Image (cartoon, rainbow, N blue to C red):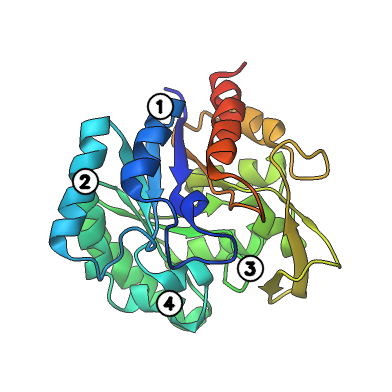
Amino acid sequence: MNMKLSLSVRIAEPPKQKDVAAIPIDVLAPHAKALGFDGISMRASVLSVDSPADQVRRVRQLLDTLGLSVSMVSGDIPLASNDANAIRALRNITPYLDLADGVGSKMVRVMMHSGEDIPFAQRAADEAAERGLRLVHLTHWGTMFETVEESLETLATVGRDNFGVAFEPANLLACGGDYGPDAIERLTPHLFNVFYSTAVRDPSSSMTFNSRRQGPVPMRFTALNDPDGIPAAPLVKRLRGTGYDGWFTVHQPLRDNEDADDAMRAAADLFRGLIAGN
């Protein structure tokens, strides 16, 4: 089986905003399908645990009609912004699992900030397992998954087969760890999803990733074809080499003055070929 290509609805959010979708899902989803994406990674800017049931049903019907799957759900804004409330999903996972079921997804994003979150993660994973669902934690600044080493340690401590990781290279770069193909290889036994965005460290940037290990790290997202960014081809090649056949999610945000249609087309053109091995 081949990897499946997913588009994060992050691309529909205005730059530096995570709580609103500037492009309605009724427009975004058909465009994604036409460009060759297999699925949508859902965020709270479109659907959240607070969305009315009829809205969830409407979006599910739209995606089903188009033949698009929901690769993963991020059920609230704090999960996207990684603020102090990002851990609350683990304290009450039921609404997040309900949202995943509502849109037909098998994966739910969660966040862990400290060792205090471990028993909650275990209980949440057990509840998810009863419903045939998986919990997924991105490699992410400000969490217990800042590096590959820390991710593996945390996964071992949680100790649940349905609790895994999504590889996200820009966060690993910001936190000072390995973010290349070898990192993918080490995470492979626990790899549930891949999130790709490309960025560089830039001291002149006003955007910071607040890493616990490195402190505030100024970062700047780059174009997908920027040679100074994170090379995508070696990552996809290693994924194919490991036999990974899960979701590959384009999680690239819009940059200032970037057109969403152009960004979606560029992502589709690049990753369709890479995933196919061309």
- Residue at screen point 37% across, 79% down: 88
Q: Which residue is the site of mark 3?
A: 141
Amino acid type assigned to the residue bearing label 3 in the image: Trp
Label 4: element kind: helix
- Residue at screen point 59% across, 60% down: 15
Give the CA separation, mark 1 to mark 4: 36 Å
Of all residues shown, which one is farthest toward the left?
Answer: 54
Q: Are marks 1 and 4 in contact (CB under 8 Å)?
A: no
Is residue 185 found left or right of 220 in the rendered image?
left
- Look at the picture and state if 19 lies above or below 8: below
Residue 87 - label: 4
Q: Which residue is the site of mark 1?
A: 34
Give the CA separation, mark 3 to mark 2: 31 Å
Q: Residue 34 at what x, y percent from top left?
A: 40, 26
Mark toward the start of the polypeptide (2 vs 1): 1
Nearer to the camera, 124 or 275: 275
Label 1: element kind: helix
- Residue at screen point 32% across, 79% down: 91
* Front of the two marks 2 and 1: 1
Q: Do the residues labelled 3 and 4 touch (CB within 8 Å)?
A: no
Label 2: element kind: helix
* Front of the two marks 3 and 1: 1
Give the CA separation, mark 3 to mark 1: 34 Å
Mark 3, other Cα within 10 Å: few <14 / some 14–19 / many ≥20: many
Q: Which residue is the site of mark 2?
A: 60
